[in-house]
Image: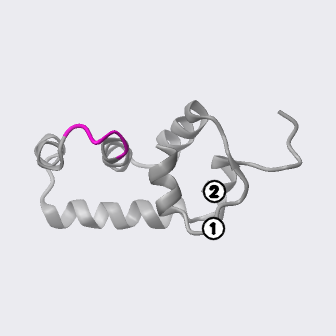
Amino acid sequence: MKELLSQLIRKPLGTWKDEEEIRWVLRRRLTKKEYKILSARAERNPTKEELLLKLRLDEKRYEELWEKIGKKLNLDSIKKELFRFESEGD
């Protein structure tokens, strides 16, 4: 998941939080379909065609949602929840 997010986020703010925390933030901040698309692309399972059928999307809507995911992930408010800052003591 972190590899895919690294490709989508233009300016990281620090080090990544752990995988479980990242998934929790994404579930809360993305719609169900956006989250399913993101997690399916990260895991490469199911295939894109299977996902389109399962979510009842056409190719155009899928691409619109993918662009929307990229925009949301680059919002500072969401980035702050995905990254651990140097001042945090964990």
- Tell me which secondary structure the magenta stretch mostly adopts: loop
Q: Kindly indicate the quadrant of the structure image that contains residue 80.
A: bottom right
On screen, residue 64 above or below 88: below
Q: Where is residue 23 in the image (x, y as percent from the top left)?
A: 51, 37
**x then y, percent, for residue 29:** 51, 48
Task: Judge left or right: residue 15 versus residue 33.
Answer: right
Left or right: where 17 falls relative to 61: right
Q: How crowded is mark 1: few (under 14 residues within 10 Å), some or many (20 or more)?
A: few
- In this rendering, is residue 90 above or below 37? above
Q: Where does residue 76 sit, x and y in percent of width and height?
A: 65, 63
Q: In the rendered structure, does residue 14 fall within the stretch colored magenta?
A: no
Q: Quadrant of the C terminus?
A: top right
Q: In this view, does 23 lie above or below 33?
A: above
Q: Quadrant of residue 25?
A: top right
Q: Closer to us: mark 1 or mark 2?
A: 1
Instruction: Please give the range of residues in magenta.
Output: 42-46
Q: Residue 11 carries which label?
A: 1
**Count of marks overlaid on the render:** 2
Of helix, strand and loop, which one carries label 2? Answer: helix
Q: Which residue is drawn at 56% across and 30% down?
A: 20
Residue corresponding to mark 2: 79
Give the Cα distance between marks 1 and 2. Answer: 9 Å
Query: Judging from the image, what secondary structure is the residue with disc 1 in?
Result: loop
Dot 1 and dot 2 residues touching (CB under 8 Å): yes
Could you say which disc has been placed on residue 24 in the image? Answer: none
Q: Which amino acid does label 1 sit on?
A: Lys
For the residue carrying disc 2, how many other residues have a C-alpha within 10 Å: few (<14), some (14-19), or many (20+)?
Answer: some
Q: Residue at x 44, y 52 (%)?
A: 4
Tell me the amino acid under the disc marked 2.
Lys
Which of marks 2 and 1 precedes in the sequence? 1
User: Which of the pair 56/59 is nearer the observer?
Assistant: 59
